[in-house]
Image (cartoon, helix red, strand yellow):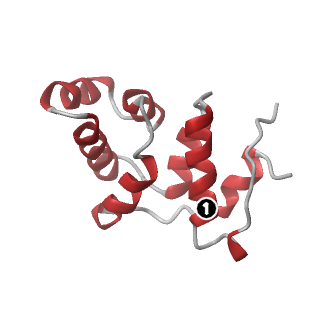
Amino acid sequence: MTTLRTATSLVDDTPLTESDLVPVLESIVEVTDWIRLGIQLRLPHFELMSIEHDSHSRIDCHRKMILKWLHIRLASWSSLVEALKHFLSINEMHIAEQIIIDHPNNPNNTHYSLKRTP
C-alpha cells in the first residue's frame, strides 16, 4: 500500500505555468473549501480575502486563487497534492489520489490509496 509520503513522489516538481490553469482547475473542481486550499498553498490571507470579495462564484474564486498561486509561488503538481493531503475530507483526499493516478509519471496509471502516516 502506498502512503501519502511515497505517493507524492509519483508527481513531479516541474513548475506549472498559466498554460496549466485548465488542468489544475479541472483537478480541484470538487474542492469546496478553496480558502483552506489557498492557505495550504501558502497564499497570503489578504490575497484570499481579496479574491473572495471580488469574485461571484466558487469557480471564479478557484480560478483567481490558482492564477495567483501560479504567479507568486513555485507551483507544481506535487505541491498541489501536498496541499490537498492536509485536508481531512475524503473528497479532497480523492482529488489528490486522482492527480497521482492521472500524472504522466505514474506508469500504467496504477491506483494508489492515500493513507496518512504518522
Give the residue type at disc 1. Val
Q: Quadrant of residue 41?
A: top left
Q: Residue at x 31, y 41 (%)?
A: 62
Count of number-bearing discs? 1
Task: Identify the element where label 1 is drawn.
Answer: loop
State whether residue 112 is above or below residue 105: above
Quarter of the figure that contains the C terminus: top right
Would you say 56 lies left or right of 78 here? left
Would you say 16 lies left or right of 87 here? left
In the rendered image, residue 59, in percent from the top left (x then y), is placed at 27, 41
* Residue at mark 1: 11
Q: Residue at x 36, y 52 (%)?
A: 25
Would you say 39 lies left or right of 115 here? left
In the rendered image, residue 93, in percent from the top left (x then y), is placed at 62, 40
State whether residue 20 is above or below residue 39: below
Furthest toward the bottom, the residue is: 108
Would you say 47 lies left or right of 20 here? left
Q: Nearer the viewer, residue 101 or 84?
A: 101
In the rendered image, residue 97, in percent from the top left (x then y), is placed at 64, 51
In the rendered image, residue 47, in percent from the top left (x then y), is placed at 25, 30
Label 1 packing within 10 angstroms: few (<14), some (14-19), many (20+): many
Q: Nearer the viewer, residue 97 or 12?
A: 97
Q: Nearer the viewer, residue 55 or 15?
A: 55
Q: Residue at x 22, y 34 (%)?
A: 57
